[in-house]
Image: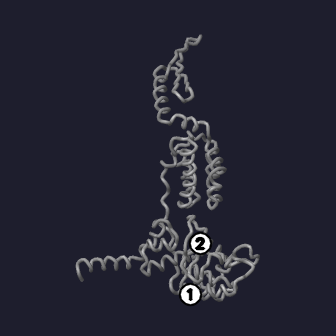
Amino acid sequence: MASINKYVAGSGKTTYRARVRLKGCPVQTATFSRLTDAKKWVQDTESAIREGRHFRTSEAKRHTLADLVDRYVKDVLPSKPKQMKDQGHQLRWWKTEIGPYLLVDVTPAVLVKCRDELGKTRAPATVVRYMAALSHAYTIAVNEWQWLEDSPVRKVKKPKESRGRVRFLDDDERVRLLQASRESGNSYLHVCIILALSTGMRKAELMGLRWPDVNLKEQFIILHKTKNGERRRVPLAGYGLELLKKHSKVRRLDSDFLFPSAALNKPVDLRKPFENALREAEINDFRWHDLRHCTASYLAMNGASLAEIAEVLGHKTLQMVKRYAHLSEGHVSRVVESMNSKIFGS
């Protein structure tokens, strides 16, 4: 039910007090100098309340972006331990830039300005991560906290990311790196590089391996902690399996890490030995993570499909492995040729 009352002040100024009262909702009031404005407000407010939009707008006028970030960091981020550090840093950047803004005033135009400012010092992929962190915070605020009707981040275009780095060792580079790793002063380096190349495991996955995760008899490793949060079974074969069997015979009994540090309570740090091996092998522009690209590239060149590569690397979708598609074009051509031969004859 709505009502509009007319008031005339001693000075002769006329105002209109509008009131909207709907069952189960707090009474809403507003004052206007024109009757037409009061009528429009009544109509809009009644519609917004019935559709569940009005009180979200009110919440957006009471909370700032800093409030949103603080609550998200306190209540939501602890449930995402692997992303807690990075996303916390990203969200604090948004808080520094536009924290005092009321949520109702954080428009797509405001976010575009921030995006462009961020892009002056960060790569497009990094800007996308910053926007993704804010987007999820807004999604929680919309769906769970009922602070807003919609997220302004949805209307902001993300920068176009690069196609992704594909740096893998050619045959000569691989031979030189393996020789340098054999001659390294670190006894773990060679076996770790071989395992990285033969399995596609990420560095953190490989370094975090413990002996209970390894089944040499059945020839597989179980990764309990992966980037996408799912357990993954990693097959062992060939030279990598052979080296791991030899390594198991000289394992430390006072630590269950496959590759423990001198302190035994954490994995070894191979950064320096790896850099020295690269320098000795005269290999430039190569990082440990590129060993994973090597695995994917070698799989593609040996006829593996993108789905098979994704399975080996532990990707949930094919998006991340599409960068290797050009390396498997020969395999695709053979598949098409085989299909045509069977259907139409040779």
At x 65%, y 55%, the residue is 78
Please state which of residues 280 and 250 is positioned toward the viewer in this rendering: 250
Q: Earlier in the sequence, mark 1 or mark 2?
A: 2
At x 50%, y 83%, the residue is 170
Image-quadrant location for residue 272: bottom right
Numbered tag placed on residue 223 in the rendering: 2
Mark 1 is surrounded, within 10 Å at the Cα level, by few (under 14), some (14 to 19) or many (20 or more) other residues, namely few
Image-quadrant location for residue 302: bottom left
Do tag 1 and tag 2 residues touch (Cβ < 8 Å)?
A: no
Q: Is residue 17 above or below residue 293?
A: above
Is residue 251 found left or right of 60 in the rendered image? right
Residue 107 location (% of width, % of height): 53, 43
Q: To which residue does mark 1 refer?
A: 239
Image-quadrant location for residue 178: bottom right
Q: Is residue 61 above or below residue 249?
A: above
Name the element at disc 1. Answer: helix
Residue 277 location (% of width, % of height): 63, 83
Please state which of residues 292 and 80 is positioned toward the viewer in this rendering: 80
At x 55%, y 85%, the residue is 174
